[in-house]
Image (cartoon, rainbow, N blue to C red):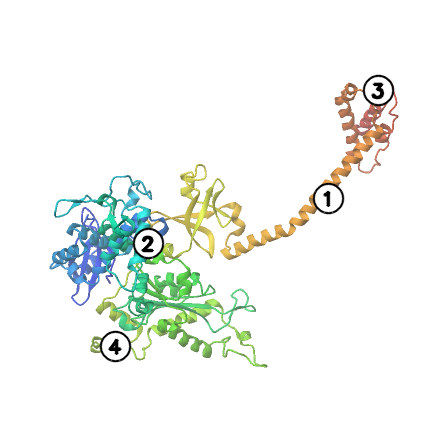
Amino acid sequence: MIMENQVFQYIDKQDGGRIRVLYVDSDRACLYYVNIDSVTSMPRKETIEKIEAEIKNNLLVQIKDPYITTYSEDKLSDLQKEKRDTDWEIVDSFWQSSKDQLLNKKGREKKIREIAEEANLSIFKIKKIFSRFWQRGMTKNALLPDYINSGGKGKSKKLSKNKVGKPRKVNLVGEAIEGINVTEEIKKIFEVSINRYYRKKEKPSFKLVYDSMLREFFSDRYVENGEVKYKLWDKSRIPTYQQFYYWFRKLQNLEKDITFRESSKAFDLNYRPILKNSTMETDGPGTRFQIDATVGDIYLLSSLNRDRIIGRPVIYAVIDVYSRLITGIYVGLEGPSWIGAMMALDNMVADKVEFCKSYEIEITKEQWSSKHLPEIIIADRGEFEGYSVENLTNNLNIKIENTPPYRGDLKGIVERYFRTTNEKIKHKTPGAILKEYRQRGDRDYRLDATLTLEEFTQMFIKMVLHHNHKIIDKYPMDKEMISDELTPTPINLWNWGIKNKKGRLRVIDRDIMRLNILPKGKASISRAGLKFKKLYYSSQKAIEEQWFVKPKHRWIEIVYDPRNINQIYIPSEDGRQYEKCYLLEKSKQYKDCILEEIIFQEELKEELIEWEANEQVQYNIDLDKEIDDIIKKAKKEKQRTVTQTTSKAKKTQGIKENRKLEKEIKRMEEAFEIGREKKEGIVKAFNGADNNQNSEEKNTRHLTLMEKIKKQRDEKLGK
């Protein structure tokens, strides 16, 4: 089945022509595509039958999308965002409303001419904008300029006295319309003027606001005949009306404008985001998915030891609003949190046959065929507001609609599914919570827990498969559905909608999806490796490019899975590849640990060190005291035994002989004499001699001692 946004390549053409499917019109049995390798390319029409035949005969093969990327908003320059957002306004304004005219050759030129006139741009510029949008994946970030191939990345242009921008225009009388460079100071004047003159209940026109700004900030004030008058500055010193209007649109805050010019009620009534989720707001499968989480009303056992109760599981479900088909699930212990939501989104694009097979459940593709991205995801404020969803919005073109607090009714479909599921769990499974409060004497239902997490997941998958084939009560069926004798089950509605409705289903590589939903972090680069969360990593690329010898950057952005920190990943600049980093040997003590456990262990280590800090100080103080005592005792002993009349020269003579003698004495004391008594008296004889003996007597004593030592040594050696 051919889906919107799929990319194919002809293998029988020399240039290997690549095309992207823009739109599939099931009613007319045709589709529209563009060549993604041309500088500019307008849509072409072809029958679905012919394209399917080319695919079947291997003339046309599906390939990975070469333009799907993962851009981080904080890495984009202001100029890149400005150009993207300016072009996006044109695409967003005309693509959906004028899709039929833009896709078909007949009437396309006329429509492009109308757009060009309304946007005050050239026809070539309009064609270039739509070509880039079509060729590069029909996302907002498809309109980003290719600054990755240009120099001066992220550098702001230095403004001089010369006017920058488009060439000067000349009015009807031949005068040049100059204008000035819009610096930060001028922008501040624009902002103040808009707040002071535009955001008023009187709703002044924009031209009046511009005149008021010129009078206040770009004119000289003087008094004539007691009346205050204003003299406007020369044209080369004031901003033009076009400049003021351009920056007003660029910095516009629609909510603030409407609130001050009308009222906050008017904004809430007519301009606030509409978060309805009924089936009538969708035009086919994939238009809107709802995601939500609940805690299962059942207690589970550990798979390692069924004597241990591990608590209640967290259940996530993703449901297609149009068909009620469940497109993704997660059953585990994560959350409700972004990790749990991330797992559900990952399962949303997974092959369900392989997923069920991992739980020993055999199904066919027809039983559960969903593995697609939607156009809109409706979610709670919690997970999808606390985590940055810019990647989902800008890289994958998925709009996120967060429901207000206490408005679960805005996700009524998935909420109702959870109520039905929990009711079935309560009446079927042991360990279920039968009532909210237990009375005295009631049996503790937690003791009845029987299922492990894997067994409960198997059961939940069976319930999902049953739901996807169950008739939906009170489904608002179209006349065409009734004419086709359609039974309103989720799987039937899904398949019928793909065939007959304008769905928004898109496929994506699972690794690209994971790169977009995994949490981000920053790793420092040093000679010790890549450091992240006090763990050290390396990679093949880092070694080959000698990052740890001559690091070009101190930090690098990574993505990681908190449940498995054995590897982290460095996304490439093109957003399609990644570099896997592995854990170094010095951090292997944390192998196979989850991030929370590592953080806990590090915090515990720091607490223990801090706890022992006072004891360490006390040990240091005691050691210093003991050393001082030994030194004091030695000084006293020296004063008592050393002759003060001995000259310095004599004290330094015979150091070598003294050392040799001392060495022989220590050898005698330290020698291993197994089975024999220690020889005593040598040291005492040496230290107890009269210090007042003259030099000759000392020498005689030394010889006597040496003779004794040699005699004892000879005895030990058997001489």
Looking at marks 2 and 4 on the same chain, the residue that comes earlier in the sequence is marked by: 2
Task: Say whether residue 536 is left or right of residue 79.
Answer: right
Q: Write down the quadrant of residue 60 in the picture.
A: bottom left
Q: Are marks 3 and 1 in contact (CB under 8 Å)?
A: no
Cα separation between marks 4 and 1: 87 Å
Labels 2, 4: front one:
2
Looking at marks 2 and 1 on the same chain, the residue that comes earlier in the sequence is marked by: 2
The amino acid on which the numbered mark 3 sits, given as a three-letter code, is: Asn
Labels 2, 1: front one:
2
User: Where does residue 313 sit, x and y in percent of width and height?
Assistant: 47, 68
Cα separation between marks 2 and 1: 69 Å
Which structural element holds mark 3? helix
Cα separation between marks 3 and 1: 43 Å
61 and 334: which one is in front? 334
Looking at marks 3 and 2 on the same chain, the residue that comes earlier in the sequence is marked by: 2
Task: Say whether residue 350 is left or right of residue 102.
Answer: right
The amino acid on which the numbered mark 4 sits, given as a three-letter code, is: Met
Q: Which residue is mark 1?
A: 622
Q: Which residue is mark 4?
A: 477
Labels 4, 1: front one:
1
Mark linked to residue 699: 3
Looking at marks 3 and 1 on the same chain, the residue that comes earlier in the sequence is marked by: 1
Q: Which residue is mark 2?
A: 192
The amino acid on which the numbered mark 1 sits, given as a three-letter code, is: Asp
